[in-house]
Image (spheres, rainbow, N blue to C red):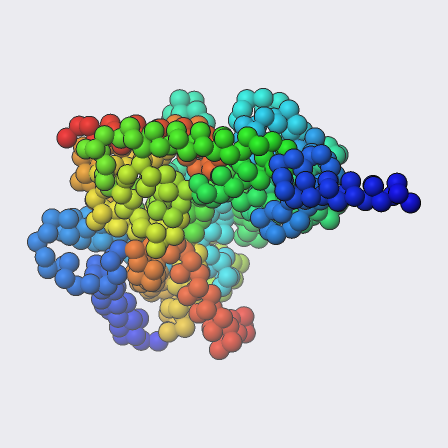
Amino acid sequence: MTRSKPLSLMLALLLIACLLGLLSVAVGSSGFSLDGLVGADPVQQQILWQIRLPRSSGAWLAGALLGLAGAVAQGLFRNPLADPYLLGASSGASLGVAALLALAGTSPLAASWWLHLGLTGAAFCGAVGAVILTLILARGVEQTMRLLLAGVIVGVVLGSVTALLMLVAPEIMRPMQAFMLGTTGFLGWPSVLLMGPLLLACLLAALGASRALDAMTLGEATAASLGVRLNIVRMLLIAVLALATGAAVAQAGLIAFVGLVAPHLVRSRLHCNHSWLLLLSALTGGALLMGADMLARWLLAPQELPVGVVTSLLGGAYLLWLMHRQPLLERRK
Amino acid sequence: MPNAATKIAHGLMLAAALFAQPGMAWAAGFSIQDDLGHQQQFSQTPRRIVSLLPSLTETVCVLGACERLVGVDRYSDFPAQVNKLPKLGGLDDIQIEAIVALRPDVVILSPASRVHERLAALGLKVMVLEATSQADVKRVLLKLGELLGTQDGLKIWQQIDAAIHLAAASVPPAARGLTVYYEVDSAPYAAGEASFIGEMLTRLGARNIVGKALGPFPKLNPEFIVRANPQVIMIAQGRAENLAGRPGWQNIRALRDKHVCQFDAALSDLMGRPGPRMAEAAQAMARCLSDSGGKP
């Protein structure tokens, strides 16, 4: 394993992101056109600078957060099917959004503090809260299996509460659907400014734990005997997972498959240690979501596909191909 | 047997009368076709009715048969007296047992409700009626009038139509042709020209920025709205919190000139309900347009 290969993949991914970024600012409600980019029309300039650029960069950042979270989850649970939503973050975020929408429909005064959070705040609190709930139910981080089960339980229970809320307040069904299918439509500069530093922080924290992740691939007992302080590492990585997923989900809704597929894409290109895997997964996730966002607004312009539908289609097709090309489980043996 | 012959002759005359005047049908058995093309036979005017759609509930009541309702769906809330009736669930959780137990003579519901086959299989008379346009409202009024044995349907429709006409006439010339964006939801979903809401806006002389080709409730690229730069935005209260905070929206004419009409929950419910109160919705929209067009 040489250093040059991951490095060249990283450069390639950055290049892809730049190309996609350039391409995607030419794609909008009027389909693909270049004439808007050079004109001095103020509306056109505004669309370019205040809508398309932040939207594309926001999509990249959200995708990168999800890719990173996916790589962290797969490394932490040593399971190739782990994704960022494993510990209940997605159902928590849905519940947060549903609760906010339902309360907004009933009595704005009674819930003013909750309304003050806004949809993104509610989704973020919900996602992080669900992960904390999972940790409590699993009584800490000692047992990976218990964490996984607690995550499933939290996911199912919070999901049913959300379904109940939607039944009681049917008017929230449409915005809920939009949230659950993922939406990049309203990503602005504030979202970018929020996600950018967070991505950096999460990436640094995860990279700091990457040697421990490498050791954990040999089994948790071995890792412990190599001097890895499992509980601290797990806590740190779960915090990264929760923050990265919560931020991405809060800004862009429940985007499917990006977090699951990004690390697989990287692994299918090269074998590398976790520090590279984490970094490259983030870059891959970013490129994936940026591309999906571009397709979502291009295919039916001026109508939009929910971006989650595009990522699911692409991601599902890719996983299917990967499965038949090289069974995942066999490869790990 | 002369007696039998007279009976047959009477029967034939009765039948002829039936066909000539469907409105007189309650004199004996009659049959009505619902929107799925199913023919329903009734031996007499139904006296126990279950309605599983708010606009159908309202239509039954405006036809003066409110006291014949024995159960409604969860969302039927007008007129107030229907709130005392058993609520039989929503679109996805209709309580079939409760409906059967109410022994209705007829169940009226929308095609979107999936229970009609189940109810029909249980031996209930089911009428599926669709209302998604103003023409539908008229048709449903006449059809339910027929079912309820009243001729008032047409008269009521004419009143509704006249009230909408009046609302349209109340919009000053300066406010005609304003470009309008009606946001159904923040994804953003718009009410296009092809929707019931859009149809009303067109009648009031407004220009919808979302044309027919995009379908009734398209999910739009937010950029499309910025580009269309509408003069008026109509939206439900509570959904309009942060319109100006959306990327690029602060310069949209409607936001700059503060021509954002917020409809309270009851009113925005009403706007999307193709029923006998649609003239009230028209008046609210007309007020919004007048307010927006009155000021420069």
Relative height, residue B106 to residue A331 (above, below): above
Q: Point out the image quarter for the C terminus of chain A.
A: bottom right
Relative height, residue A185 to residue A257 (above, below): above
Q: Nearer the viewer, residue A277 or B122?
A: B122
Q: In the image, residue A234 lies at what x, y percent?
A: 45, 50
Using the rendered view, name the quadrant where residue A227 is placed. Answer: bottom left
Does A181 sit left or right of B124 as displayed? left
Residue at left offset 73%, top offset 37%: B28
Residue A130 appears in the rendering: no
Does A91 sit left or right of B64 as displayed? left
Does A117 sit left or right of A151 as displayed? left
Using the rendered view, name the quadrant where residue B195 is placed. Answer: top left
Query: Residue farthest to the left?
Result: A40
Q: Nearer the viewer, residue A173 or A202?
A: A173
Residue at left offset 61%, top offset 52%: B37
Q: Point out the image quarter for the N terminus of chain A.
A: bottom left
Does A313 sit left or right of A30 as displayed? right
Query: Residue farthest to the bottom?
Result: A325
Residue at left offset 41%, top offset 33%: B161
Q: In the image, residue A261 lies at what x, y percent?
A: 42, 64
Q: In the image, residue B74 lies at what x, y percent?
A: 58, 33
Relative height, residue A326 to residue B73 (above, below): below
Query: Residue farthest to the front?
Result: B2
Q: In the image, residue A332 lies at what x, y percent?
A: 51, 71
Q: Nearer the viewer, residue A92 or A9?
A: A92
Residue at left offset 53%, top offset 45%: B130
Residue B178 appears in the rendering: yes
Q: Nearer the viewer, residue A69 or B122?
A: B122
Number of residue marks? 0
